[in-house]
Amino acid sequence: MDLLKKYQKEFIYKEETYKIIGCAMAVHNELGPGFLEAVYQEALAIVFDEEKVPYEKEKELLISFRGKVLKKRYLADFYCFNKIIVELKASKRIDNNDFAQILNYLKATNQEIGLLINFGSEKLEYKRVIRTKDNK
């Protein structure tokens, strides 16, 4: 893949992801670290409403295997703009398990973009996770 195509792929949904991250920054700036994840989720929903970010809270994600939908479901903290999975954390730092979790969500839903947002550190921590042919 040439560099330009790779660069363009990495920045799909740029405006939408920036808006989501901006809302998360507003929550973190006001609350700071130290609360439970559920507190940040509720506060972020308020900011999403104020900023008119379309979302579904605790979106049930279906998992298919060999053409059949499994009974096991995932719950994403938010599903924004009908295309971006947002997973929240309230820990000291994002780790590989968190990354694997959102990558599994992307695989299960066949979505391309997810945001992993951690409110637990002194500075808001976020990772933009892109599902590519390498991690399908």
Image: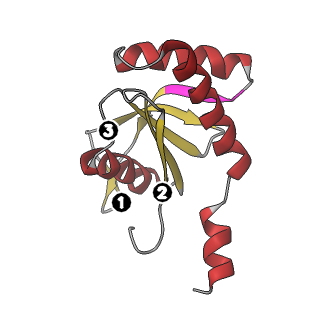
Q: Amino acid at mark 2?
A: Asn
Do the CB atoms of the residues marked 2 and 1 lie less than 8 Å apart? no
Does label 2 or label 1 sit earlier along the sequence?
Answer: 1
**Counting other residues with Cα less than 10 Å from the Cα at mark 3, is it few (<14), some (14-19), or many (20 or more)?**
some
Q: Amino acid at mark 1?
A: Gly
Q: Which residue is mark 1?
A: 67
Left or right of 125? Residue 5 is right
Whole-percent x and y of residue 1? 57, 86
Residue at horizontal 51%, vertical 42%? 85
Assign a secondary structure to mark 2.
Answer: loop
Residue at horizontal 48%, vertical 42%? 126
Q: Nearer the viewer, mark 2 or mark 3?
A: 3
Q: Please check the rendered image and state whether residue 89 is part of the magenta-colored stretch, yes or no.
A: no
Left or right of 21? Residue 90 is left
Label number found at residue 110: 2
Residue at horizontal 69%, vertical 36%? 19
Magenta segment: 53-57
Label number found at residue 93: 3
The quarter of the rendered structure image containing the C terminus is bottom left
Mark 1–mark 3 distance (CA, rounded to whole Å): 36 Å
